[in-house]
Amino acid sequence: MRSLEIARRFAQLGETKQASRAYYLALNESGETNPSEELEAALYLLQFGGGTDYKVSYTVFCRLYNSGFCKEDILQIMDEAFYAPNVKQAQSRYRKNCALLEKYPYIFRKDFLKFEALPIRFYPFDDNSYTPYYPEEERFGDYINPKEPVIRHNFFKDLEKPVLAQDIFSQYELEYLRDNVRRSEDAGRENHVYLHYSSFAQFCAWLSCLNLKPLLEEKKLVFLFEDELDLYPIDFQARFHIDYSAAPPKPFTIREIKRLIWHVQLSSHNGGDFFNEVMDFHPNLMAMSSVMMSDIEKDIATTRKGLELAQNLNHALQMFQAVDAPHRLVEELYRMKNPTDKDLLVFLHLKDRDVTSGLDPNARISPAIFFQPHFGNVICTLEREESTGRTILQGSGHDEALDSPALRGFPYIKTFVPLRRFTTSYAATVRFVDVRTPGEIDSYIRGEREHPSVMSDLIFERILNRTFMVDPEERLYKDSTIVRFEDGKLNSRATFTALAAFLDLPYTESMTYCSEFGDQRGGQAIIPGNAPGFDPVSVYRTYDEFANDSERRFLEYFLQDAYAFYGYDFQFYDGKPMDLEQVKDLILHFDTLNSYMRRSWDLLFEVLKVNIVGDNALPEDEEERKLQMREAYLKTIVDSRLKNAENLMRGLQFVSKRGQPLQMMPLLQLDPELLEQPLYH
């Protein structure tokens, strides 16, 4: 029996909850219902469903209307259920916005339409979202959320002239422009934001959704309509008798900085250093060298403690003298009411002369914080959930960032993640963790370094690290992209032009070379062991002595979804299905990794001069005892690998803390016209 028939039977019996559930299922049975039945189900859910069932009905109504089915009846339903209950609020918002614009000095057309004559009607979907309806075209448009925290335009591509933005109807983007374009008085020149709308009538319609009051208070915006674009840019001294150049630009203040660019550390040896070096010394960025998240949190806590202990401003100035903080910043922080962790993070950047030395003091926009916190190695584990029997991927170092008040305190956040071919980044990590040279070993023995640790199971750490998958509703990943390391090396202009556009920055000369605090190091590698600048040698390194074919085939097999999504071809896996026995056979041939894990044990014994006391369970010979300990550890690792492989072969579903399915983070798309050579595969 079809779900629709079950639903009708429950409805006849007055079992509304069960009927609603069955009607919902009927709507999701592909190819099983016709438009009349879909309308029946949607109407029942609208009338008797609970919670968010109305959204299902709403969506069905819009789709059926646009398909031409029962248009008059459906529009009447949409009007009565969604438009009429909210129309007074929309009218009130429209009139308030029109009244504000009537008094605003930088809008030159004020013949606002009557509400009834607006060319778009907005049907509320929830508290923040609408669906526009175009009466003349008799169609519903796509859902829109004016407050969605995503910046979709490269507003700051060219800062030679004042910012000009076309047809911007996003409340979030308008507030972003207000908050990140400096006031003309602060920039020391005419620096208004020019908003040009190709249709005055369409602009009027959107006034029923937007809140202009907070946008107009600082008088940063200039509104232009249709052919008024010829007025851009306005000579404010000639037209309004205002000379902004009379005073020099003002220094950046702590609460002026509201934009964060989070450079995510996906894994070890994934190309993050290279991206730091390219983004270094950008005139609109404040970028520290890579820092441990735990160290930043300590610095924030120490700064807050210093503020709490300061008895007066002079005392605060004395206390912060040791960290060489400019007096104006200390005074601003001291006088600030309730400084947040975000404010303290900005203070730590602004006070650092290395970090601010490359900033353009005459910039039209406030600088962004460019932040790459490190978390040590990113570790994920498979945990069995006893209540459901599900196996869930748990934990990573990134949880520290996702829960950080300092990061979450920024109202505007862009996130990008460098990605390198998985087999290459894995082998490079083994190379880094292994201690190879006699000099390095001697430095441990002399006590110049902390004692070495036993090498962990790097291959499964890499397999289980799926932090390229995100909850799209997580605030710090809402506006995010993946950037391939290989593209940055092989097609640098196309990659960094696209990355600048995504981050809403100008593509500057500073992005055409690698540096640290502006120092290009004469073309030499900034970090020893890395390839200098844009040298592509690190793209083609295979590190064969640090990974064998079984290990790399295993990586490619279990990461094949990521390989396909991000455009990498297989080099070791043939693409054929594998069963559990084949997978176990690969694990039993992880000879290269196992050899380096054994070496790490041998080094530990040598450096610590371990004297292992025997017992009845261990051989009498000390070397035999050490060997037995080492092999027992490896056996534990192998057993864990086999167990995890069984779980992986079940085809795990990856979900967020909220229980929502994770999605692949979008890949940065490059302009084909800017490619210098074919894309890497």
Image: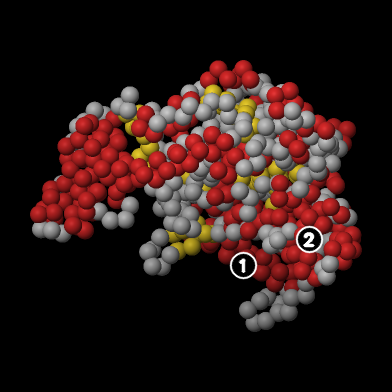
Badge 2 is on which residue? 334
What residue do we see at 82% from left, 57% from top?
Answer: 330
User: For mark 2, does the 10 Å Cα neighbourhood hold few (<14), some (14 to 19), or many (20 or more) residues?
Assistant: some
Kindly report which numbered mark, 2 or 1, lies closer to the viewer in this rendering: 2
| Nearer to me, 196 or 322 | 196
Asked whether residue 358 is in view, the answer is yes
Depth check, front residue: 595 or 271? 271
Q: Is residue 497 left or right of residue 38?
A: right
Q: Position of residue 572 (x, y in %)?
A: 56, 37
2 or 1: tag closer to the N-terminus: 2
Q: Is residue 62 left or right of residue 617?
A: left
Q: Is residue 517 visible?
A: no
Give the residue at x 13% y 55%: 10
User: Would you identify the image quadrant in which residue 293 lies?
Assistant: bottom right
Q: Which amino acid lies under the numbered mark 1 shown in the image of this protein?
A: Ala
Instruction: Quickly name the residue at label 1.
Output: 632
Rendered view: 324 above or below 414: below
Secondary structure type for disc 2: helix
In percent of width and height, residue 224 lies at: 57, 25
Report x, y in % for residue 81: 27, 45
Q: How many marks?
A: 2
> Residue sitting at 67 percent across and 65 percent down?
630
Q: Is residue 541 above or below residue 1?
A: above
Residue that appears at 20% across and 40% down? 39
Q: Nearer the viewer, residue 240 or 171?
A: 240
Callout 1: helix, strand or loop?
helix
Disc 2 residue type? Answer: Tyr
Question: For the C terminus, which image quadrant?
Answer: top right
Q: Are marks 2 and 1 in contact (CB under 8 Å)?
A: no
Q: Residue furthest bottom?
A: 616
